[in-house]
Image: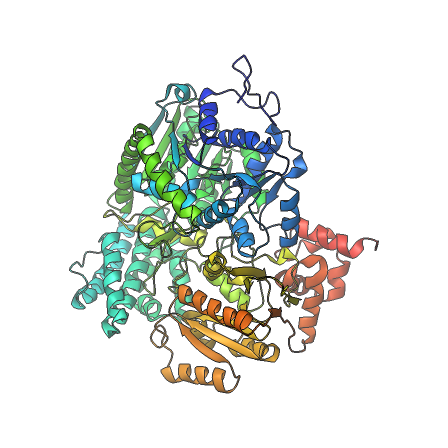
Amino acid sequence: MATTDGPEFVEGPLLVDGVLENRTYQRRLADAALETHTLVCLPTGLGKTTVSLLVTAERLAGDVVNKSLLLAPTKPLVQQHADFYREALTVPDDEIVVYTGDTRPDDRADLWSGARVVVATPEVVENDLVGSRVDLTDVVHITFDECHRATGEYAYNYIAERYHEQARDPLATGMSASPGDDEEAILEVCGNLGLSQVEVMTEADADVDEFTHETTVEWERVELPETVIEIRDALHEVITDRLEKLKELGVTSTTQPDTSEREIQRIQGELRQLMDNDQSEGYEGMSLLAEVRKLRTAVTYAETQSVESLRRYFERQKQAARASGASKADQRMVSDPKVREAVRKAEAYDDLHPKFRQTRMLLAQTLGIEGGERVIVFTESRDTAETLTDFLGEHFETRKFVGQSDTDGSDGMTQNEQQETLDAFRAGEFEVLVSTSVAEEGLDVPEVDRVLFYEPVPTAIRAIQRKGRTGRQTEGAVSVLLAEDTRDEAYFWKARNDQKRMRKELRSLKSMAGEIESELGQSTMTDFESGAAVETNGDSSSPPDRTTTDGSLAEKHGESGGASPRETEGEAERKSKRSGTVSSDDATSSQATGTSEAGSDRSDGSGGASGDDTGDDGQAGLDAFAGDTEGGSESGSADSTATGDDPDGTVATADPSGEDTEVVVDQRELDAAIAKDLSRREGITTRLETLAVGDYVLSDRVVVERKTVSDFLDTLTGSDERSMFEQVKDATRNYARPVVVIEGRDLYSERSVHPNAIRGALASLAVDFGASVLRTEDEDETAELLRTIATREQEDNERTVSVHGEKSSKTLAEQQEYVVASVAEVGPVTARSLLAAFGSVEAVLTADTDELQSAEGVGEVTAERIRDVVGSDYDR
C-alpha cells in the first residue's frame, strides 16, 4: 500500500488524495487484513473504518466486477459509513449504495447489481439471501462492523456462512473495539465469521498511544430514599413467597429475593425437565418463576431508574393481565396485596430518584465550573431517557437520542431526526445528549468532556464503547452513578472484573496470535468450506440467550421468560401479519427483539452488543429494558409496506425448469429461523413473497399455515385480529391440500383454555375445512417437515410451485384501503391511517404534502411520493 513521502496522507488505488491521514497503525492493520480473514481489534475512535476502507480499495482495484460489502448494525451507522466511503474513494457516488429495509426489495436487487460498494444493515442482506434475491459471488471483501455481535443467531453468522460458500475470492474482516469478554467469546466470534487471524492494537502500542488520552472514571454513589426502599421491600416479600413455593417443589434451596441470575436459570432448567416428563409441578413452577422474573424487573426499575419508570412498568403489567388469554402469572402478580401496596406507594411518590439530582450537579460542574461544552448521558431505559431530558432541559440545552422503534407510550426517532440531532450536537447547538445505547456503537458522536452512565452496565463491551465517546482528542472524564445496596453494585463489580479480564485476554491474544490463528485456521475455514454452520458452545441453533439492540438481555424461555416491559417487535409482527399489516423488513427476525412478557419462545438480538449478566452478581442484563430495542434497530422482520408488494399478496408461478426444490416463504415468517434453515439445505431454493394465502407454498396444491402454540391459542381467545379459520378458509379456496402446522409443546397447558375448546378447533380444521393438521415440536422439525412435503410434491409427483392469491370479495372499506395502499405503494397500514385522517379516497388523493403528513405514520418522503404519483403527468 503506497503512502506519501511525508507523514500527512495515504495514497493508493481508488483513494481520494488528501483525505486519509497517514497513521502507521492503520496501514499495518490493513496490510495484515489483506492477507487473510482477520479480526481487527482497535480502541474506539481510532479509525477501524479507515482500516476496512484501505482493504476495500485494494480489493476493488483488481477488477471492475468486484464488489465490497460493509455491514453495520444500525441505519445511522450505515449512512455514516457510506458518507465516509463516498468522501474517501474515487468510486462514483451512485456505485456506493446504502442498502436497508427503507428500500423496496426490487430496488435493492437493482442497486446490488449496479454497485461496487454496498453498505447495509445485516438483516436486509440476510433476508435477501434467504429470498434468493442476491448472491455474494462477486463480493471480494466483506466487513463486519461491531463484529462482537456475531453470537447466537445474529444475522452476521448466516451471512458469513453464505459468503464463504458463495464468494469466488472471499476476504472477510471483522472490526470491534471490544470483541468479547474473554478468550472463548472472541474465538466464538472468529468461528462464526470464518476469521483465521487476530490483529490487536491497544493504547499501549507506540503507534496508537499518541492518538489516545487518559480517561478517568469516577464512581458516584447515591442512597435510596426511604419510600423507594419500602417499595423494594414489599416486592421482595412477594419474591420470597414465590421462591418458597418453588422450594417446596424441590427445584431450589434458596428463598433470597436477590438470588443470582445463574440460580434463576438453573431453576428454569429444573422446571423444564419436569415439564419434559409431563409433571404438573413443572408447569406450576414455570408460572411462579415468571412472577419472580417480572418482580425482579420491577425492583430494578425502582432501585436503579426511577419510581416513574416503575409506575409505567406496572401499568403495562396491569394491561397485560386484563388482556384476553393473559397468563396466570400476570393475573396473580397484579392482584397480590403486597404488589398493590407497592403500586400505591409508587403512585403517591412525587419525588425523583436521587440520581437525577446527582446528574444535574455533575453536569453543572462540567459545563459551568470547568467550562466544558458537551456531555453525553447514557441510560438503559427509554422511560428514563425521556424523563431525564425533561428534567435536565430546565437547566441545560438538552436533547434525547433514542432508537427508531416505537414502543408503548414512547415515540422513536426517525433516521433523519437522529442525524439532525447528531449534527446539531457536533455544531454545539446544545450541550447535553441523553441517549440510550443507540449511541454506543460506532456512531460518529463528537468528542465530549464527560460521559455519564446513569447506571453501570453489566458487560465490559458496552462499558468500553461508552467510555470511547471521550478521551480521543484530550483528557476525558467518565462518571458512573451507582445506587448503594442495589443491583447497580453487582453490575459495577461484574463490568469491572470483565474489563480486567478482557484486557488480559486481548494481551494474551496479542502474544499468542500465531498459536490462536493456527487453531482458527484449522477449525473455522474447514467448517465454512464444507458448507457446515459453525457451532459454538454446544448447540448454535439454540443460543442460551439473545440481547436487544438497546443492550438489554432477552432470554429464550417459556412462560417464565424475561419481564420485558413491552411486547417484542417479533411478536407484534406475528400479530400484525394476522391482521394484514406488515412492518419494516430491515430487522433482525428472531435476533433483534426482546422477549415478550407473555413468554414467547422467540426472542437481538443485538447479538453480543450488550451481553448479559449470567454470573452470580445480579439479574441478567437489565432485561427490564429489552422493550426499547435501541440502536436504531430495524424493527420487525418482513419487507416493509414500502416494498411495493401487493397488499393482497403476490400471484406468481415459479420457473419449473430449475432442478432444486423450491419453497416459497411469506416474508413475514422471517421472525422464525425456518426459512434460513431451509435456505442452507442442499437442493432447496427459498423465495420470499408477500403471500395472500398461507405461510409456505410447497406446490400448486399444497399451502402451509404455520401456527406456534401461542398463535393457535390466540385465535381461540380472540387475541388474534384475523381468525385462523378465516385464514384456513382462504387456503382451502385456493389450494387443494391446505396444511396447518401447530408448532411447540404444551398445547393443552400453556394457557387457561379448556381442552375441549382446543379439541373442537382441531376437529373443525380437519372436518369443516378439510385441512391436514400436523404437530411439530420446534422450528427444526417444522423445517424438515416442509422440506419433506415439498420434495414429495415437486420431485416425486412432478408438481410445480404456484402461488395463488385470490380472496373472497372485499367490503367497501377493504376496497378503499386497497386503492389507497396501491398509491405509491404505501401499504395497508398507512392506507388505513390516511383514510382515518381524511375520511375518503378522494380526500386522500387531493391532499397536499403538508396535509398528508398530518396522518399518523406519514412522513415527508411518503407524502412526496404520494403526490408525485397522483399529480405527475402520465408519460408512457
Tag count: 0
Q: Eyeballing the image, is 136 above or below 311?
A: above
Query: x%, y% of residue 530?
Result: 42, 49
| Residue 40 in the image, given as x and y percentages of width and height | 42, 33
- In the depicted structure, whether residue 587 falls above or below residue 712: above
Residue 189, can we see it?
no
Quarter of the picture containing the C terminus is bottom right
Where is residue 749 shown, x and y percent of the image? 33, 75
* Residue at figure coordinates x 67%, y 38% from the top left: 94
Residue placed most toward the observer, 429 or 533: 533
Residue reaching furthest top?
6
Q: Which of 92 and 656 is in front in this view?
A: 656
Applied colour scheme: rainbow
Work out whether 733 lies above or below 533. Answer: below
Q: Quick check: 870 left or right of 467? A: right
- Visible in this render: residue 784? yes
Q: Is residue 685 above or below residue 203?
A: below
Q: Does residue 489 appear left or right of residue 90 in this picture?
A: left
Closest to the observer: 192 or 750? 192
Q: Which percent across, then down, holds residue 16?
A: 62, 25
